[in-house]
């Protein structure tokens, strides 16, 4: 994608009218560059509305992604839930593609009482089949299973790297707040953040660092993992250090802010990143040649 873009998980709060096309225009007015369409309850837009969203995104040069419905579990004991999960991912991918989105984010599964290896194989089988269906339709979206915030959920960094290696058309969505919560307050230092990115680079190549899809927010957690999202200022995630690591690795892709205040924290993250860029450029300029 050429650079790291910043945006919001949904329509910015400051948008005068609560429509996706208005939200896209407001993203550009704020000086942000991307927005995630939060189809987390259901995918209900028609083709005409999807075309309007795509046209707005192209007009304002805003990169779109989609968060598919929350009610997805490819390891459910109930066949009807697994079937519905496939239909929800496919619906998000199909309408997302029509709306001009490339990345389709979702939470893939719960472990229940099954070994993680068994769950991994089940998720992989569904990803292979769903990608095949989409490619037959000429749909080139990237499926982005997300790192999850509870130890009961499928979605460690290692699992998603392995899945992405085995299934073309799949790449991780790395939610740093979820990883922090999943670790019970761990995964919260520059070394920890850098370790995650090194794992991705080692497993998927440097090109994966040029095409990141990142979620971030403040987060409240218990010993069972994620509880709720918070604003950055009221949480303990070391987001300033996280931004420094993003800059050090010269990432490309999108950072989607999921804080309750949305654009406020997205703008903070973007400003910190640009400050790091400016400082780096100044040091290079002062360096003897």
Image (cartoon, grey):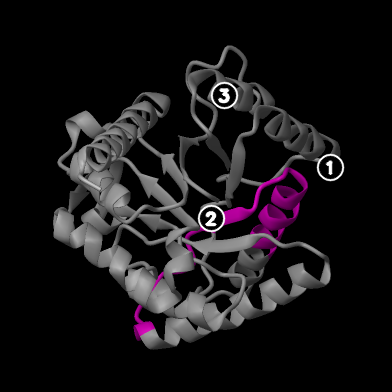
Q: Position of residue 164 (x, y in %)?
A: 50, 75
Badges 3 and 2: C-beta atoms under 8 Å apart? no
Q: Report crowding for label 2: few under 14, some 14 to 19, many 20 or more residues within 10 A (C-alpha).
A: many
> Eyeballing the image, is 3 above or below 206?
above
Residue at image position (43%, 68%) is 206
Q: Secondary structure at mark 1?
A: helix
For marks 1 and 3, give the CA distance: 24 Å
Q: CA distance from mark 2 to mark 1?
A: 20 Å
Residue 110 among magenta residues: yes
Q: Residue furthest top?
A: 16
> Image check: 46 left or right of 30?
right
Label 2: which secondary element: strand
Residue 28, numbered label? 3
What residue appears at the point 61 percent right and 64 percent down from the top-left corner? Answer: 85
Q: Which mark is residue 31?
A: none
Quick check: marks 2 and 1 in contact, CB under 8 Å? no
Q: Position of residue 196 (x, y in %)?
A: 28, 65
Image-based side of 66 in relation to 219, left or right: right
User: Residue under circle 2?
Assistant: 105
Q: Which numbered disc, 2 or 1, marks the residue that appears first in the sequence?
A: 1
Secondary structure at badge 3 equals: helix
Of the image marks 1 and 3, the number of the one nearer the N terminus: 3
248 or 73, nearer to the observer: 248
Q: Quadrant of residue 134?
A: bottom right
Give the quarter of the image for residue 284.
Answer: top left
Q: Which residue is mark 1?
A: 47
Q: Can the viewer see residue 156?
A: no
- Whether residue 209 is in magenta: the answer is no
Write the start and end of the magenta stretch as one range.
87-116
> Above or below — where is 38 with respect to 125?
above
State how far apart marks 3 and 2 are (Cα): 22 Å
């Amino acid at each position: 994608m050429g650079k790291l873009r910043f945006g919001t998980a949904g329509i910015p709060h400051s948008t005068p009218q609560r429509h996706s096309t208005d939200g896209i225009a407001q993203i550009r007015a704020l000086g942000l560059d991307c927005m995630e369409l939060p189809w987390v309850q259901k995918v209900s837009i028609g083709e005409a509305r999807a075309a309007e969203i795509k046209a707005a995104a192209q007009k304002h040069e805003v990169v779109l992604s989609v968060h598919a419905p929350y009610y997805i579990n490819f390891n459910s004991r109930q066949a009807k839930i697994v079937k519905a999960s496939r239909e929800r991912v496919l619906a998000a991918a199909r309408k997302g593609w029509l709306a001009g989105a490339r990345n389709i984010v979702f939470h893939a599964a719960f472990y229940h009482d099954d070994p993680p290896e068994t769950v991994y194989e089940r998720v992989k089988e569904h990803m292979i089949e769903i990608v095949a269906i989409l490619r037959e339709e000429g749909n080139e979206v990237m499926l982005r299973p997300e790192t999850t915030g509870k130890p009961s959920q499928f979605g460690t960094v290692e699992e998603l790297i392995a899945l992405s290696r085995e299934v073309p058309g799949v790449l991780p969505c790395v939610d740093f707040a979820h990883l922090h919560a999943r670790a019970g307050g761990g995964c919260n230092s520059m070394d920890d953040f850098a370790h995650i990115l090194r794992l991705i680079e080692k497993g998927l190549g440097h090109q994966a660092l040029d095409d990141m899809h990142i979620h971030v927010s403040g987060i409240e957690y218990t010993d069972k993992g994620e509880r709720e999202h918070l604003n950055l200022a009221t949480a303990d995630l070391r987001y300033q250090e996280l931004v420094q690591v993003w800059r050090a690795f010269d990432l490309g892709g999108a950072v989607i802010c999921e804080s309750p205040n949305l654009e406020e924290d997205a703008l903070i993250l973007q400003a910190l990143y640009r400050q790091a860029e400016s400082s780096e450029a100044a040091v290079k300029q002062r360096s003897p040649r």
